[in-house]
Image (spheres, rainbow, N blue to C red):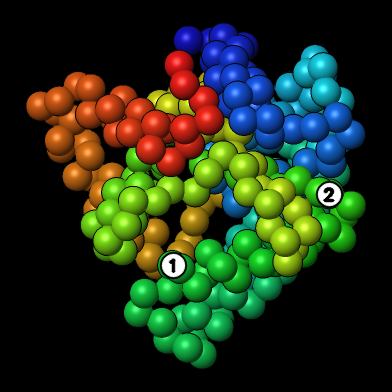
Amino acid sequence: MKEKDLMRRILSYTRKAVQDYDLIQEGDHVCVGLSGGKDSLALLCALANLRIFYPKKFKLSAVTVSLGFPGTDYSEVQALCDKLNVPYKIIHSQIAEILFDIRKESNPCALCANMRRGALNDAAREMGCNVVALGHHHEDIIETSLLALFYEGRYYCFPPKTWLDRAQVSVIRPFIYVEETFIKQYQEAANLPVVHNPCPMDKTSKRAEIKELIRTLSKDNRDLQTNLFGAVKRGLWPEIEE
């Protein structure tokens, strides 16, 4: 599938999520949290395209929270933002040093996520943004619900839109309907400047284990992911019914 066709499909799912859950309001200033991975880069491109024709006009900016791993280069991400006419800011942090050298965390993912979110939300607010957009996609929803069920003993998944009172921003997830396969295909077709994740915990986390479990179970049940996503929608986000 060609780049334009892939973006057209991604845009259709993105617009549906934005409309279903009222994610973007007239005059919003949306900040995309850019990790440098394929999901957030594709989200940036999708929202930059949506900004052109969506009836509710909004502004768009982007922020990367650099964890402080040596050799990480975001210059090509900056070039993409320049091409899309999206203001871009890199926040340099010492999160990696704090987690791995000072605290020597054996399971750092939750704390890392909290620290990154805090830095992202603060930077977004400083840039005048009232909305933060994250690149969680269709499969992320399923995996998060199973992680909560298996390891926390509760039925939970982050909602499409959340108001954070302390940070004074709304967090939205416009990619909840977008399947990862379309993101991967778009990444390759558009040659997105993905920044390699140097974290030693990458692909060794509990989420990676859940992803492999879903892949295994899906071999015998082609409807598994559809059913799991539907359960989340009906059980946790009952406002929208197909």
47, above or below 103, in the image: above
Q: Position of residue 110 (x, y in %)?
A: 45, 68
Q: Position of residue 184 (x, y in %)?
A: 45, 29
Residue at x 47% of width, y 88% of height: 103
Is 115 situated left or right of 81 in this image? left
Residue that numbered label 2 is attached to: 129
Give whichever of discs 1 and 2 has the lower sequence position. 1
Q: Position of residue 17 (x, y in %)?
A: 59, 26
Residue at x 59% of width, y 15% of height: 12
- Looking at this view, is 42 or 150 the one in front? 150
Marks 1 and 2 close (CB-CB < 8 Å):
no
Is residue 3 in sight in this rendering?
Answer: no
State which quadrant residue 148 falls in: bottom left
For the residues marked 1 and 2, what is the alpha-carbon distance in whole angstroms?
Answer: 26 Å
Is 229 situated left or right of 23 in this image? left
226, above or below 133, in the image: above
Label 1 crowd (10 A; few <14 / some 14-19 / many >=20):
some
- Tell me the amino acid under the disc marked 1: Cys
State which quadrant residue 96 falls in: bottom right
Q: Position of residue 25 (x, y in %)?
A: 80, 32
In the current view of this chain or complex, which residue is farthest to the front?
239
- Looking at this view, is 56 or 165 the one in front? 165
Residue at x 52% of width, y 25% of height: 240
Instruction: Name the quarter where the C terminus is drawn.
Output: top left
Residue that numbered label 1 is attached to: 109
- Looking at this view, is 84 or 176 the one in front? 176
- Looking at this view, is 206 or 195 the one in front? 206
- Tell me the amino acid under the disc marked 2: Cys
In the current view of this chain or complex, which residue is farthest to the bottom?
102
1, above or below 36, in the image: above
